[in-house]
Image (cartoon, coloured by chain):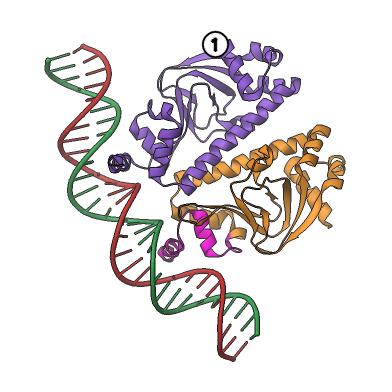
Chain colours: A purple, B orange, C green, D red
Amino acid sequence: MTETQILNYALNQFAGIDADAFELSAPYWQRKTYKKGEFYNEYKNVCKYLGFILDGVFRTYYIDEESAEEKNVFFYSKNQVVVAYKSFVTQTPCSYYTESMTESTILYIHINHLTELYGRSHHWERFGRLVAETAFNLAMNRAEEFMFRSPEQRYLELIQNHPDIFNNVPLYHIASYLGIQAPSLSRIRKRMVGK
Amino acid sequence: MTETQILNYALNQFAGIDADAFELSAPYWQRKTYKKGEFYNEYKNVCKYLGFILDGVFRTYYIDEESAEEKNVFFYSKNQVVVAYKSFVTQTPCSYYTESMTESTILYIHINHLTELYGRSHHWERFGRLVAETAFNLAMNRAEEFMFRSPEQRYLELIQNHPDIFNNVPLYHIASYLGIQAPSLSRIRKRMVGK
DNA sequence: TGACGATCTTAACTTGGGTTAAGAATATAG
DNA sequence: CTATATTCTTAACCCAAGTTAAGATCGTCA
């Protein structure tokens, strides 16, 4: 399967993009590879591209001014969209850094091209709506994790629901994503040995 | 100013809905009043209406199965949209209760009518997109409050940014919204007397 | 293989929220 | 204006996470 075919398949699964609609977009997608540590989008930059991850893992993180600590906000992996959503849709500077945590490959499209596609096909309009809903769900899930679950529960659910992330990311990044310090995560893991 | 004029003005402010576009929608808006404690939408119900608050305050809350406690998720007040967004856009059962905390008055529109308006005017399509972005921002802000701020900081920011809510809601509901117990909020308030 | 850097765990101590129950302050109704 | 219910605060004790620093483990590469 070529990369384009993978993308076509994924877009079809995600938003019912059919062959014709995909054709419209084909000239606009570009390919890019990232080394570990390279940025997809940086703090204060306007996010101009929406990416589709062929391979690799990305993280977006916030730098707390008080503590100067990095706080992981989202992870994105294979076959997912990576984008700084708010910055992208409002074309305003981003509050976050989004970085590749591994060697990665993505296909990406410029917001102007995407906007053009919205006008040319209802399939793409639906795609836009579904990206919006996905972004909402990501944010809402994150809020719910923190509002309703303990750090221990968040840890267990991460293992359950995102083993791909858990298995490819150092524990101190997991701890940051869970909203705790590395020693706390160690204690949680120790506590759970018996269970 | 009539209630319809208030709505027209608010929709124009929010999404640039002009007189013509508003005309299209006029037959669909209905008015409803709520007593304190009445539900806008209940757990397991599909949210079929999008409401605009003329007066009053609503809360949406989650009931934690383990502790059987209510956890406040969002507050909505005057001139804001009230809707169980995810349930509304996917027409699936809601995980939350949304309740009026005061005597309230809203204007509301059925999802079918709204969908019809999307097809009839770009103004309304934009409205739909902006509601989506508003929902995303609400959820993302909530996630950020919990990921990046301490309970004390959340309390201070609530007072700063939402005095209307702070002044109209009992402290034990504020505590729940901040993700802490009432005694903790008391301690935070006491701690701050000196500052 | 051995040495270095990165990652993970542990220990000791501090801090702040949870829990429970009692009591104070505030509203509300009769 | 009192009685009553609601809301808010306080106290005492517990526990989990934060903090800091040390040391163990793991990986990698010369």
- Asked if residue A178 shows in the view, the reply is no
* Vertical position of residue C6 compared to residue A69: above or below: above
Q: Quadrant of the N terminus of chain B?
A: bottom right
The reply to whether the magenta stretch includes residue B130 is no
In front of the other: A158 or A110: A158
At x 59% / y 49%, what residue is drawn? B96
**Residue B167 placement (x, y as % from top left):** 59, 64
Label 1's element?
helix
Q: Quadrant of the C terminus of chain B?
A: bottom left
Which residue, as the protein is rendered here, is positioned at the far top? A2
**Residue A110 placement (x, y as % from top left):** 62, 20
Question: Which contiguous range is marked in magenta?
Answer: B166-195
At x 58% / y 34%, what residue is drawn? A135
In front of the other: B9 or C8: C8
In front of the other: B89 or A67: B89
Relative to B104, A178 lies left or right: left
Number of numbered labels in the structure image = 1
* Vertical position of residue A29 compared to residue D12: above or below: above
Residue assigned mark 1:
A3
* Occupied quadrant, residue C16: bottom left
At x 55% / y 20%, what residue is drawn? A52
In front of the other: B47 or A113: B47
Dominant secondary structure (helix, strand or loop) of the stretch shown in magenta: helix
At x 50% / y 40%, what residue is drawn? A142
**Residue D10 placement (x, y as % from top left):** 38, 72
* Occupied quadrant, residue A13: top right
The reply to whether the magenta stretch includes residue B183 is yes
* Occupied quadrant, residue D26: top left
* Vertical position of residue B78 compared to residue D12: above or below: above
Task: Name the chain letter of the residue that bears numbered label 1.
Answer: A
Amino acid type of the residue tagged 1 in the rendering = Glu
